[in-house]
Each structure stands twice: as structure tokens, then as C-alpha cells.
Image: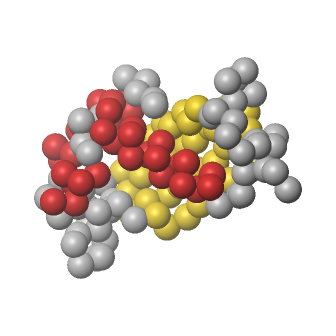
């Protein structure tokens, strides 16, 4: 059909989330080495306009909510003209290495919150 396959948007959300955490000073790999994982528990997406193969895109990512046991990220996928192609959100729970729900360490929460309220977006 010449348009981007819908599942790619989920990959773009993940790229946006990964880069947001890196910009906040908490790369995923470092959090995982320290025993904190952030699995996705819910995904929402709305497709607004079509995007074709090889079209450049920009992903805006923000943390919408943060709590001791989880968080929600919001995303906007834009074309170079600034037109909204899709938007969505992912909900996450913090877990330990065994996949059990856990509270995030206070230093991690403080760093995420500081970046979130500073308008940190990527």
C-alpha cells in the first residue's frame, strides 16, 4: 500500500521513550543493570495521517504521569511540516529483574520527575 506499517509506530514510541530516558540521565541499559525494569502494560495509538516509506519523521515524547510503581509516556509522531501523523501513550509498571512489581528507587524517581517537570521532551 506504500504506507508505513502500523506496528512501526510502536517501535517509534519505544525509540522516543528510550531517548527520553537517556536525555533524563537514566539510560535503559543502566536502569536494567541496576535491577529496575519498565515493561509496557498498555498501549494506545491513534493514526491521524498517512506516512509513506522513507518519509522523515520526528517523535515527541513526554512523561505524562509518574508514580512510585509506574509511569505513562505520551507520544506524537510528526512529519517535517509539523503535521501530526499519530499520537499515543504507553503505560508501564516498574519491576525487579524477576518481573515482580516494585517501587522505583527514590533517586530514579527524583531524576525522572526533575526532567519531566522541566519540560523534558525528546
Q: Is residue 37 visible?
A: yes
- 94 left or right of 88 in image: left
Q: Nearer the viewer, residue 109 or 10?
A: 10
Q: Is residue 30 above or below residue 79?
A: below
Q: Nearer the viewer, residue 73 or 2?
A: 2
Q: Nearer the viewer, residue 117 or 75?
A: 75
Q: Is residue 116 above or below residue 31?
A: above
Q: Is residue 65 visible?
A: no
- Measured as percent of width and height from the top left, residue 56 is found at 64, 33
Q: Nearer the viewer, residue 117 or 30?
A: 30
**Residue name at image x 35 percent, y 60 percent:** 38
Residue placed furthest toward the right: 1
Q: How many marks?
A: 0
Q: Quadrant of residue 109?
A: top left
- 80 left or right of 90 in image: right
- 90 left or right of 110 in image: right
* Quadrant of the drawing holding the N terminus: bottom right
**Residue name at image x 71 percent, y 58 percent:** 6
- Measured as percent of width and height from the top left, residue 105 is found at 18, 53
- Measured as percent of width and height from the top left, residue 28 is found at 28, 51
Amino acid at each position: 500500500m506504500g504506507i508505513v506499517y502500523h506496528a512501526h509506530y510502536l517501535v517509534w514510541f519505544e525509540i522516543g521513550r528510550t531517548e527520553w530516558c537517556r536525555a533524563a540521565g537514566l539510560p535503559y541499559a543502566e536502569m536494567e543493570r541496576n535491577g529496575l525494569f519498565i515493561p509496557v502494560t498498555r498501549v494506545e495509538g491513534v493514526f491521524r495521517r498517512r506516512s509513506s516509506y522513507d518519509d522523515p519523521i520526528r517523535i515527541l515524547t513526554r512523561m505524562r504521569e509518574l508514580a512510585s510503581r509506574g509511569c505513562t509516556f505520551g507520544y506524537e509522531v510528526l512529519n517535517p511540516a509539523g503535521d501530526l501523523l499519530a499520537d499515543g501513550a504507553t503505560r508501564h509498571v516498574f519491576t525487579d529483574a524477576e518481573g515482580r512489581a516494585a517501587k522505583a528507587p527514590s533517586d530514579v524517581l527524583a531524576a525522572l520527575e526533575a526532567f519531566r517537570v522541566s519540560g523534558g521532551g525528546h
